[in-house]
Image (cartoon, rainbow, N blue to C red):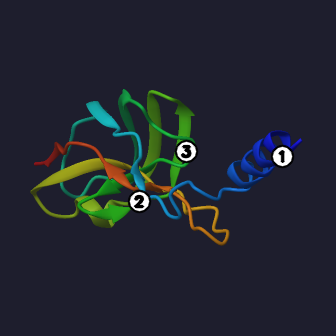
Amino acid sequence: MKTISVLLLAIVCLGCGYGSPKAMAPQPGVMPAVSQLVPNTANSGDPQFMLTVNGSNFSTTAVINWNGTKQTTTRMTGNQLTATIPASAIASPATIPVTVTNPGTPGSGGIYGSGGTSSETSNAMNFTVN
């Protein structure tokens, strides 16, 4: 009977989180990758346009970054995002880096903390304003 009591107590303790690590460091999120910008050029002074970013591993909350600034982004698929780029962003000739960020997720909290994920930002692909 003592053995059964000790085993039951051990199972209850392990099931409640005792004996396991109390806090886990955030795990990295999924790294998006940009493979194509459509279009990939514009003329300075052109009107606003719809930028399509093709790639992979885009989360449901992925965001297109234009020259480091988050844009209002629509996720078409896990491999395609769009954003309207304002005319003011292409007013002058420049080379603009475009990236995609999968925002991190906060931990779920609790008395022991939890993992969550950190934000991950893709490689930069350049957009040319002539």
Residues packed near mark 1 inside 10 Å, few (<14), some (14 to 19) or many (20 plus): few
User: Where residue 97 sits in the image (x, y, percent)?
Assistant: 18, 52
Quadrant in the picture for residue 8:
top right
- Tell which tag, 1 or 3, sits nearer the viewer: 1
Could you tell which of marks 1 and 2 lies nearer the N-terminus?
A: 1
Q: What residue is shown at x 67% (from left), y 68% (from top)? A: 110
Q: Is residue 33 left or right of residue 63?
A: left
Amino acid type shown at disc 2: Ala
User: Where residue 100 sits in the image (x, y, percent)?
Assistant: 35, 47
User: Where residue 29 sits in the image (x, y, percent)?
Assistant: 41, 46
In the foreground, 23 or 85: 23
Q: How many marks?
A: 3
From the image, tell me which residue sits under label 2: 25
From the image, tell me which residue sits under label 3: 74
Q: Is residue 61 left or right of residue 56?
A: right
From the image, tell me which residue sits under label 1: 2
